[in-house]
Amino acid sequence: MEQDSTKRTPLPFKGFLLTLVIAVIAYVFMSFVPHVNPDFLPYSTVSAEAGHSLFYKLIWFVQDFTNAQFYASLFAGLGLVVGAFIAYTLNSRKKRSGGFVIAYTYKIFPWVFAAQILSLIISDLLYTPLLDSTNMGWIPTFIPFVSVPVIVILEYGPSLINVLTGAVLTGVLATPLGSVINKYVLSPAGLPVVAANVFTMSILGIIVLEACRVLPFIEKKTDFYSDNPGLWGKQYGEAGPAEDLQKPTWFVRRVLADFTEAQFYGNEWASGLMLLGVLIDWIINPASIYYGNNFLPIVICAQIVSSAVGVFLYYHEWEKGFYPTFLPVVTIVPGIAGICNGNIVITLLVAVLGGVIAPPLAAYITSKLPKGLHPMIGNTMSMAVCTTILGAVCKCLPFIGSGL
C-alpha cells in the first residue's frame, strides 16, 4: 500500500521532555547555588546613579542589551554581544557550528548591530537623567535596541541613511512614548510594565515605517532582499538537513535560540553566552540582576518551558521555516512573574498559556498587516495583548502574593 504523502512527521517528544528536564535542573541549581558578593553593582545603586554618573550610565547601557528579557544584567549583556559576534563569524565562514543564522541573514548583522548601538546611545544619553525624577528606578531606555531601528534595515535594506533614520527617530521617541503609556494606562491598572513597552514598539514601528515611505532620502525598495538574494544565509529553520529537526538536539537548540529572538539574533551562541552571563551575575549578587528581585530561578525555568511548549505545539510550522515561539520568553513570563511575586504555580501556568496563545495570535495579526509593515509589529502586538489579558487575570487571583 502506498504511503500517504500528506502524513505529518511526528512531534518531537524526546526533545520536548529533554528541554523540560533542563528547565528543572536550571531552577534547582539557581535556587541553591551560593552567592559571592552582595555588594557588587546592586540594581538599586545602578538605577540611582546612572542619571549623573558616567560609570553607572555605562553599566546601565550594557544592561539595556538584555532588558527585553528582564535580565538587566551586565554580564548577560556582554555575553550577548560576544556570542552574537562569534555566531556572525562562524556564519560568515559557512560553519555548521554557527547554529541558526544570526539576524535573519548574517551579512546584514553589522548594520543591525550598528543601528541598535546608535539608537541605544541616543536613548540613554537623553533619558537616563530622568531616572533621578522617577519613583520607579527604571525607564524603558532599552526599547530601541530590540525594535524599530532593526526593522527599518530589514524593510529598506542596509545603508548608512537607513541606520541613522531608524536609530535617531526611535532613540528620541521610544522612551517617552513607553513611559507615558505605562504611567497613564497600565500602571494605574496594576498591569505589567512590559505591555507598555511592546505596545510602544508596535505603535512606533508603524509610525517610523510609514514615515520612511514618504521621506525623500529613503530609497524605496519593493522587496529589497528578493532583489539581493546574495545577502541571505540559510532560512531560519534550516539548521541542516530536514531530518535534523527530529533530533532532540535541534529542539533544545531552537528553544535556546528563542532567548535572543527579541534582539533579532535568534542564535544559540548569542543566547548561550547571554544565559552564562545571567548565571554569573546571579552567583555574584542576585540584587544586580532582574531589577533586584530574587525569583530569577523560576523565571528562567518558566522561560524555557514557555518556548518548549510553543516549539512543540507549532513544530510543523518550524518545519516550514519560522514561527514566533519566542514571544512569551521575553514578555509574558518575566512580566507576570514580577506582578505575582514569583509565584511558582502562576508563573509556570502563564508560561504554558503564553506558549500556546501568543505565537498563533502574532501570526494572525502579522497576516493582516499591510504590505511594508514588518512582522515585528504583529509580534509585539501579540505580546502586548497576551501580557495584558493574562496579567489582568492573575491580578484577580486570591493567592497572588504567595510564592508557592
Image: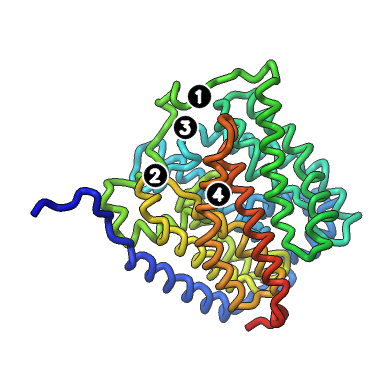
Residue at the spot of label 4: 362
Query: Label 2: few (<14), some or many (≥20) within 10 Å?
Result: some
User: Quarter-wise, where is residue 371 in the image?
Assistant: top right
Query: Which numbered dot is residue 107?
Result: 3
- Sequence-wise, the earlier of marks 2 and 4 is 2
Left or right: 173 as drawn, with respect to 222:
right
Choose between 355 and 142: the one closer to the eye: 355
User: Quarter-wise, where is residue 171 in the image?
Assistant: top right
x and y percentages locating residue 108 in the rendered image: 51, 32
Residue at the spot of label 2: 321
Query: Which numbered dot is residue 224?
Result: 1
Q: Residue at x 50, y 53 (%)?
A: 360
x and y percentages locating residue 345 in the rendered image: 59, 78
- Sequence-wise, the earlier of marks 2 and 3 is 3
Query: Label 3: few (<14), some or many (≥20) within 10 Å?
Result: some
Q: Are marks 2 and 3 in contact (CB under 8 Å)?
A: no
> In the orientation shown, which residue stands out farthest toward the left?
1
- Sequence-wise, the earlier of marks 3 and 4 is 3
Q: Does 81 appear above or below 389? A: above
Give the image's coloring scheme.
rainbow
Q: Secondary structure at mark 4?
A: helix
Task: For marks 1 and 2, give the CA distance.
Answer: 20 Å
- Sequence-wise, the earlier of marks 1 and 4 is 1
Task: For marks 1 and 3, give the CA distance.
Answer: 14 Å
The answer to whether residue 289 is seen in the rendering is: no
Q: Residue at x 55, y 26 (%)?
A: 157
The answer to whether residue 200 is seen in the rendering is: yes
For the N terminus, the image quarter is bottom left
The three-letter amino acid code for the residue at tag 3 is: Lys
x and y percentages locating residue 3 in the rendered image: 14, 53
Q: Residue at x 29, y 57 (%)?
A: 246
Q: Residue at x 55, y 69 (%)?
A: 302
